[in-house]
Amino acid sequence: MSSLFPALTDEPSGRPALRFGERSLTYAQLASAAGAVGARVREEGRVAVWATPSLETAVAVVGALLAGVAAVPLNPKSGDKELGHILGDSAPRVVLAAPGDELPAALRELERIDVEAEADAEAEADVRGAGAGVAPVGDEDPALVVYTSGTTGPPKGAVIPRRAIATTLDALADAWQWTGEDVLVHGLPLFHVHGLVLGILGPLRRGGSVRHLGRFGTQGVTRELTTGASMLFGVPTMYHRIAEALPDDPELAEALAGARLLVSGSAALPVHDHERIAAATGRRVIERYGMTETLMNTSVRADGEARAGTVGVPLPGVELRLVDEDGSAVEAYDGESVGEIQVRGPNLFTEYLNRPDATAAAFTSDGWFRTGDVAVRDPDGYVRIVGRKATDLIKSGGYKIGAGEIENALLEHPGVREAAVTGEPDADLGERIVAWVVPTDPEALPAEGELADHVARRLAPHKRPRVVRYLDALPRNDMGKIMKRALPS
C-alpha cells in the first residue's frame, strides 16, 4: 500500500505542516520527529497515545502510522474506570506522551516514551532520505483503535484499518475540493475521529497544513482565517458560539466570509444557527455525517447546495440505504419516510476489538453496517438525519417521528436557547413527545401551549410536544452531543 502521507517525502522541506499556538513543524521536521517515534515503536503491537491537543500527539500518531503500529488515542479527561477498561481491552505495550505531561495512575504501569517534537536539520535529512521510516504495511492492517463513547455499556474499541483512513480522506478531498493549498484551522480534541483523522491526518495526506487553536475561541478563528487559513472545522457548540458572537464582531464576520469552506460535524447543527451565520457572513456551513466505526459516510459537496439541516449525499465509494424495522428497504425519497441508515464501503472499520459478538451484531448478513441513526431522504437524494434509533425515533399515534426536526423547530422560537426531544410512554398515543428546553430568559418562559403550537405550525400537529420541561442546561459530552440518557427521569 502506498504511504498515507506521501507529502512527508514529496513536499519541499520548509513547507508548513502543523502549528499549535506558537509551536510549528515543517514537513521535514515532522518527518524527522515522527520517524524517530516510529523507529522506537516499530516492534510494538499497539501503542497508547495520551492525546492532548499538542504537537506531540500529532507526531506520536503519525510516527505510529509510519511504523505500521496501531495507535490507541486516550482522552485525557477519561476517569480511572474508563481508562482501566480501555487499557485492559487494548493492551498497549507503551504509552506515548509529551515530556512533562503528568499521567494518571492507570498508565503508570506502562513503559513511557516521551515524544520530542523538535528535530535537528541533520536528522531531518537522514529521515527524509530513508523514506520517512515508512514500514511495509497492508490496506487492512490496523491504523487506530478508537473507543466509542460507551453510552450503552463499556466503550468498544473500533479497529480502523489504514484502508478506511485513506479512502475517507480521499473521498472528502473529492467532495470538498480539498488540496495541498488549503490551510485548516480547528480547536477539536485529538482523541476522536473528527479532530484527529479529519483535522490532523486529513491536511497531512493532502500536503496542506493545519493550525490548531489549542482551545476554541472566536478570536482565534478570526486571527487564523485572516492570516491564510482557508477551512474551518467545528462542532455545533462552536458554531453556536460563533453565531452568538457575530452581531457584535464584524471582524469575525469578515473572516468567515473569506473562508473557502466551513464544516460542522459530530452532531446536527441547528437550522437557526445555520441561518444566523449565513445572514451575517454570506457563507453557509456545510455538514457531513460519520461515525467512529465508519469514518465519513456523506457530505454536502463544496460545489453543491449547502442546505441547512442535511448532511448531503453519500461520499464516493460509500453505499447508503434506509431500512425499516422489518428489514425492508425504504425506497421513498420524499423527505418524510423514516428508516435506519445502513452503510457499506471501504470506509468501514474492521471489528470491535475482542468483541466478536458485538461485531457480528453490527453487520447484516450481506455486509451492511447498522448505524443506529434514523433519517429521511429528500427527492434529490440529500440525507436528513432525524435522530438515533434508540433515543430519537418516537412512535406516537401511529406515526414515526424523528426528534431532530422537532428540536430544530423549537430552536426557531425566540424563547428557546437549547432543546432536546424524547419520547415517553403514553397509554393513548404509545409514546408522547417531550421537549426539554433551556429558556432564553428563565424569568420569562413561553406561555403554556406556545411551544407546542409553534412546532405544530412549522411541522404537523402530530409532531407537537405534549410535555415541555425546563432545565438550566442540557447534559453534553466532550464533543458537544446532547446525552439524552442523562436527562432527568
Image: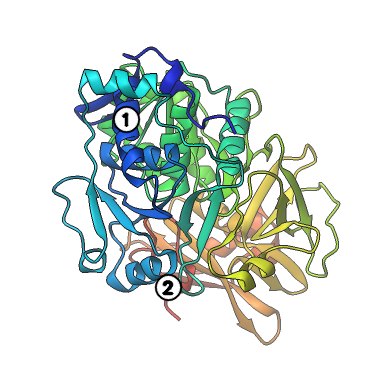
Vertical order, 176 against 427 (above or below):
above
- Circle 2 — which element? helix
Q: Which residue appears at 73% of the width and 66% of the height?
A: 400
Vertical order, 344 against 390 (above or below):
above
Residue on which disc 1 sits:
221
Q: Which mark is residue 486?
A: 2
1 or 2: tag closer to the N-terminus = 1
The location of residue 183, given as percent across then percent down, is: 40, 22
Q: Quadrant of residue 337?
A: bottom right
> Which amino acid type is shown beneath numbered disc 1?
Val
The location of residue 163, given as percent across then percent down, is: 60, 41
Residue at the extreme bottom of the image, as rendered: 427
Give the Cα separation between the discs numbered 1 and 2.
Answer: 32 Å
Q: Which residue appears at 72% of the width and 55% of the height?
A: 342
Q: Quadrant of residue 329?
A: bottom right
* Residue 146 seen in this snapshot: yes
Residue in the foreground of this view, choosing between 45 and 192: 45
> Which amino acid type is shown beneath numbered disc 2?
Ala
Label 1 CA crowd tier, 10 Å (few <14, some 14–19, many 20+): many
* Residue 251 seen in this snapshot: no
The location of residue 170, given as percent across then percent down, is: 60, 30
The location of residue 141, given as percent across then percent down, is: 56, 47
Residue at the extreme left of the image, as rendered: 100
Residue in the foreground of this view, choosing between 438 and 122: 122
- Circle 1 — which element? helix
